[in-house]
Image (cartoon, rainbow, N blue to C red):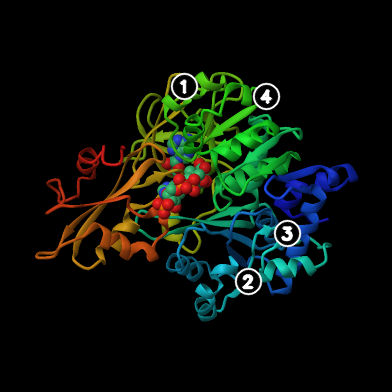
Amino acid sequence: MARNFLFDGLLADKLDTPEGRSKLFATLPDDGRHYSYGDVEDVSGRFANVLVGLGVKPGDRVAVQVQKSIEAIMLYLAVVRAGAVFLPLNTGYTPAEVEYFLGNATPRIFVCDPAKRTDYEALTAKLGIGLETMGVWQNHDISAGSLSDAGLAAPTAFKTVPRAADDLAAILYTSGTTGRSKGAMLTHDNLLSNAETLVQFWRFSSGDVLLHALPIFHTHGLFVATNTVLSVGASLIFLPAFSAEAIIANIPDATALMGVPTFYTRLLDDPGFTADLVRHMRLFVSGSAPLLSETHVQFEQRTGHRILERYGMTETNMSTSNPYEGERRAGTVGFPLPGVALRIVDAESGKALPQGEIGIIEVKGPNVFAGYWEMPEKTKEEFRDDGFFITGDVGVIDADGYVQIVGRSKDLIISGGYNIYPKELELLLDEEEGVLESAVIGVPQADFGEGVVAVLVPRPGAQLEEAVILDSIKPKIARFKQPRRIIVLDELPRNTMGKVQKNVLREAYKRLLQS
Ligand code: MCA
Ligand code: AMP
């Protein structure tokens, strides 16, 4: 029988037997509900029936901007089962930002939060996209949502649409250095092979319970955390968001936690996070942003556990990891995962560099995406002829083979695990009244690692007010991308070639966000 490569690859063996179906998939501490693996099949089947009823065909995109809920995970699986392509969007994006994604990806359906429906009616009507809503489960009821309601009424039985390894399962947008987001096309094989590799490498078993506090619109929370658990038949404790308090309350029932570095610094700031509380834990994983060596050391001193740091990208899924057994080396992201080839090359010539030299990290393997959605030129630019993907991260391999990330050749700020591309903000700020030009930089910030600062130059005779500018951009761009401070200068520092010297600005304002 023809298989759906990702869905069947993750789940078929669990759904075959009554024991497999009754196994716990998720506990939802906030409302006391539980989901078994049988429920996963039934509820994803309901949503898949609804999607097909709405006209979703294999290959169609289904864009989704909804609050975190277990139903949203079921919707992801339903899209995959219907043979369609899941396109999750950050809940923080404003309608102005979402407009670009919908126009670029031309999904069949856009699913949003019921509270945002009116924001999107005109836009989806103009683009000819179906508009549906999905609420979150509250007080034993799903708050109104057209897709949620239709799901409750739909049959559970659904004949999963066959899909091959190379078919697309998801598109995740990642911002570009030109300021325009690119849709990274992820195949069934990209996602399944990475989940299976991580299960092996991190020794996941069906007895594991992963405490899930990440958002589910990015690779980390949606694929790394969720697919890994599904693939091995383990369980989730599914939290609506991160808070140190909720982690401390639920960690006694968990065996593993995955998070961005901010999770770990916030937990260390809480005196309730003790060695006794986490003595039973098997694994703490960190990624999406650099984990300071200092945090690694403090965490071990406090808990006796060494955080396992790994490295990935939307385009590549997970590429490297510190070892499960053996030394987890602070300040490094470990070794290339099995099946992943990694090399360090000279930025100018593209030639591979010997061990110990700093250059650009390039990777190749079944984890690497299929290219950018409808951007063949961009795709070509970011791959070498021999199939290696140019990550834009700057790294070095030490004498023992550990990969260390020492910087980025791309102009990118990572704040609390979210990527912010300065160019996107600069284009927006340059449009503001009285602004001649702008430079956006990331500077150290204790909680989020890096925070955003915008440096503006006024037009002759114009007066720029920080509060006025911040207010003006508020409705146009997600909150997490908005500058924490605005500095006004007469001119930007430039080198002899006329290029803005962001390093000079970063140095000048390095203490601006340190309280
Ligand atoms: C919230 N705010 C932020 C961020 N998060 N600002 C900048 N950067 C952020 N990351 C804003 C809020 O809107 C709020 O604005 C103010 O900052 C304080 O919010 P707070 O309540 O303290 O934050 P929070 O809601 O607790 O969220 C912090 C968080 C969250 C838990 C660290 O940002 C988070 O879950 N980050 C994980 C991101 C992630 O999953 N990345 C994976 C990408 P106001 O001032 O209006 O109050 S996938 C990836 O990178 C690759 C593939 C990989 O390797 O994994
Ligand atoms: P994204 O585009 O959201 O997938 O973010 C990918 C980027 O996050 C990578 O290119 C790296 O710059 C960064 N990243 C992910 N994991 C790590 C890590 N462990 N250490 C440093 N940077 C990381």
Question: Residue 280's mark?
Answer: 4
Task: Indicate the amino acid at tag 2.
Answer: Glu
Task: Indicate the amino acid at tag 4.
Answer: His
Q: Are marks 1 and 2 in contact (CB under 8 Å)?
A: no
Which of marks 1 and 3 precedes in the sequence?
Answer: 3
**How many C-alpha atoms fall within 10 Å of the one at disc 3: few (<14), some, or many (≥20)?**
many
Q: Which residue is found at the position 72% from the left and 33% from the top?
A: 208
**How many C-alpha atoms fall within 10 Å of the one at disc 1: few (<14), some, or many (≥20)?**
some
Which of marks 4 and 1 precedes in the sequence?
Answer: 4
Figure quadrant of residue 437 = bottom left
Distance of label 3 from label 1 (alpha carbons): 44 Å
**How many C-alpha atoms fall within 10 Å of the one at disc 4: few (<14), some, or many (≥20)?**
some
Q: Point out the frontmost of discs 3 and 4.
A: 4
Distance of label 3 from label 4 (alpha carbons): 37 Å
Kindly identify which residue carries mark 2: 132
Figure quadrant of residue 151 = bottom right
Residue situated in front as seen by the camera: 43 or 351: 43
Kindly identify which residue carries mark 3: 81
Question: Residue 297's mark?
Answer: 1
Left-right relation of 229 to 285: right
Query: How many numbered circles does the render carry?
Result: 4
